[in-house]
């Protein structure tokens, strides 16, 4: 049984809404995962620094955090 024009437009609108919602959810999930990876990288660097001798300790920079986060992402996604 064929759909009426009105029913077909409602189905298409529903599909478009679901596609938009899925895209937004996917984007938010990627951002959440990226933030979690940054937090994890920072915690790793803080813990590594804490266990080093004071003479060997170096400053934790944003570059170090983002570099480790990128390495973690590469490892996780491989």
Image: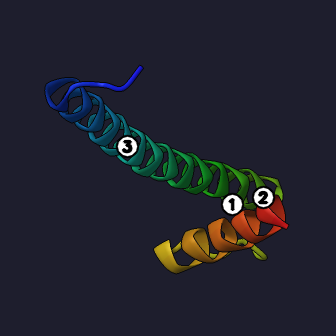
Left or right, 24 with respect to 35, comes to left
Mark 3 touching mark 1, by CB under 8 A? no
Circle nearer the viewer, 2 or 3: 3
Residue toward you, 29 or 13: 13
Residue density around tag 1, few if under 14, some if 14–19, many if 20 or more, within 10 Å: some
Along the line of sight, which residue is nearer the eye, 3 or 42? 3
**Image-quadrant location for residue 4:** top left
Compare residues 2 and 72 and report the one nearer the observer. 2
Closer to us: 27 or 55 = 27
Q: In this rendering, would 69 be left or right of 15?
A: right
Secondary structure under tag 2 reads helix
- Position above or below: 3 against 58: above
Query: Disc 1 designates what residue?
Result: 45
Whole-percent x and y of residue 71?
Answer: 74, 73
Way the structure is coloured = rainbow
Residue under label 2, please give it.
48
Q: Is residue 33 left or right of residue 76?
A: left
């Amino acid at each position: 049984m064929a759909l009426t024009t009105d029913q077909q437009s409602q189905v298409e609108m529903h599909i478009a809404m679901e596609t938009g919602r899925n895209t937004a959810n996917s984007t938010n999930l990627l951002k959440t995962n990226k933030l979690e990876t940054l937090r994890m990288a920072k915690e790793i660097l803080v813990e590594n620094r804490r266990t080093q001798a004071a003479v060997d300790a170096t400053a934790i920079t944003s570059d170090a955090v983002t570099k480790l986060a990128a390495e973690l992402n590469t490892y996780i996604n491989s």
